[in-house]
Amino acid sequence: MNSRDKTPDPVDQQLPAGRTALLGFQHVLVMYSACIVVPLILGAALKLPRDQLILIINADLFAAGLASLVQSLGFWKFGIRMPVMMGVTFTAVTPMIVIGSNPSLGLPGIYGAIIASGVFGILFAPLMGRFLRFFPSVVTGSVLLVIGISLMKVGIDWAAGGQPLLPDGSANPNYGRPLYLGISLGVLLVILLLSRFAKGFVANIAVLLGVACGFVAACLFGEVRLDELGATPWVGVIKPFAFGMPVFDPLATVSMCLVMLVTLVESTGMFLALGQIVGRPTTPERLVRGLRADGLGAVLGGIFNAFPYTSFSQNIGLVTLTGVKTRFVCVAGGLILVALGLFPKMGYIVAATPSFVLGAAALVMFGMVAMMGIRILATVDYERHRGNALLAAVSVGVGVIPLLSSAFFSQLPAWTRVVTDSGIILTTITAIALNLLFNGLGTRQQAQEAAARGAAMAEA
């Protein structure tokens, strides 16, 4: 009994430094492309010069690393202290473009709104902690399933070599090239074979090794571009308020606070699922610490010329695939992101990885997220609470509307897009409302007991 008591919690287990670093780098590779795509979109929309775009990309990596450290390592009342990697939320893209396009606001207006929304998130987090009872397993499982399904399109496009349409609206002639599909298939086969036949640490880094093989293949076929590596500086300094002091516009602040609310709802679902995966139930206290870290991440993002941040679901999928539950792997990933932000030449090499090399890995990760949702839904009682089947079916059906029909909500006012463009938010709202209709308002204790049962199943 005493020896068992001394067994460390898998979440707090510390692995050898070299192994931790490799596992952390694997987490960075899984999230890297999604992490830098937002600054690329924003830069193109605002027509930022190249030097400013490079500054924002480096700042984004640096701030994402800091936010990941706060979330996984934790300090004081911030951070859920579980294996979480933080990246910029896609929900913020449209509001940031609208704010930045206003000549009187520009980038300082964006960063002022982000900082204000972060403060709002920190103050609002304790209220979200009281809402834990609104997220029983049937709600969490439905949301997680739609997250995985929604992200599948991203992985599919990556595997095919990018977006089917170019920025000017014309068809991408390289989309779906046999070479891209072949390398993606090769990466997938490496991941599957290593996961099946390799043991121990090699199996844990199957995704990293698969991507490495794909990178080598892409190099051999001349698909990796390192032309500007020599001109990229070794060291980059991330200066706070590099574009001037933030401007706090009321309307811009309200729009970003709405984005923060969406982020908190998404994070709540993912934190509950992650707690089940690693066997550490997400209590209201842990949830509040995690959501406070989301708010602090936005404050850090605004200060360091970056963005608001949220937990990345593909990394939760990686935790499920590898079975490595220690949060210190994500601490290592956070440190690597900080280093990539401070040493642009390193970031350039990682960014040179073609999207089709990462596509197969993304499909595996997003599929694991969807499967975790299905696994949680399998724990739901459909006999005594027959409305749960209808709840899950309708919630998932509503959630995939933006994925299957881009015109479904096209006649609604533009301000509704922050909700209607996100299948995750549509699923969450629908599932919570139907859960209240069919099951009523449960207690906080019941929610914690349900989370504990899910954790027990995840451990089984």
Image: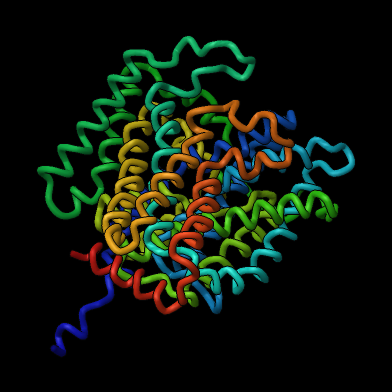
Q: How is the image coloured?
A: rainbow
Q: Quadrant of the C terminus?
A: bottom left
Decide if residue 352 is on the left or right side of residue 124.
left
Q: Residue 224 placed where, x, y %? A: 42, 24
In this orientation, does residue 65 appear?
A: no
Q: Residue 141 placed where, x, y %? A: 37, 54
In this orientation, does residue 311 appear?
A: yes
Compared with residue 359, is residue 198 higher up or lower down, i.e. above or below? below
Q: Nearer the viewer, residue 453 or 206?
A: 453
Compared with residue 397, is residue 143 higher up or lower down, i.e. above or below? below
Compared with residue 115, is residue 408 higher up or lower down, i.e. above or below? above
Q: Nearer the viewer, residue 407 or 116?
A: 407
Q: Quadrant of the N terminus?
A: bottom left
Picture mark count: 0
Q: Residue 173 placed where, x, y %? A: 48, 9
Decide if residue 289 is on the left or right side of residue 9.
right
Instruction: Name the residue furthest left.
Output: 197
- Residue name at image x 41 percent, y 64 percent: 136
Instruction: Name the residue furthest right.
Output: 104
Q: Residue 384 placed where, x, y %? A: 30, 64
- Residue name at image x 19 percent, y 48 percent: 203
Decide if residue 446 is on the left or right side of residue 58.
left
- Residue name at image x 57 percent, y 17 percent: 166
Q: Nearer the viewer, residue 138 or 194?
A: 138
Q: Nearer the viewer, residue 161 or 454?
A: 454
Residue 129's image quarter?
Answer: bottom right
- Residue name at image x 73 percent, y 36 percent: 414
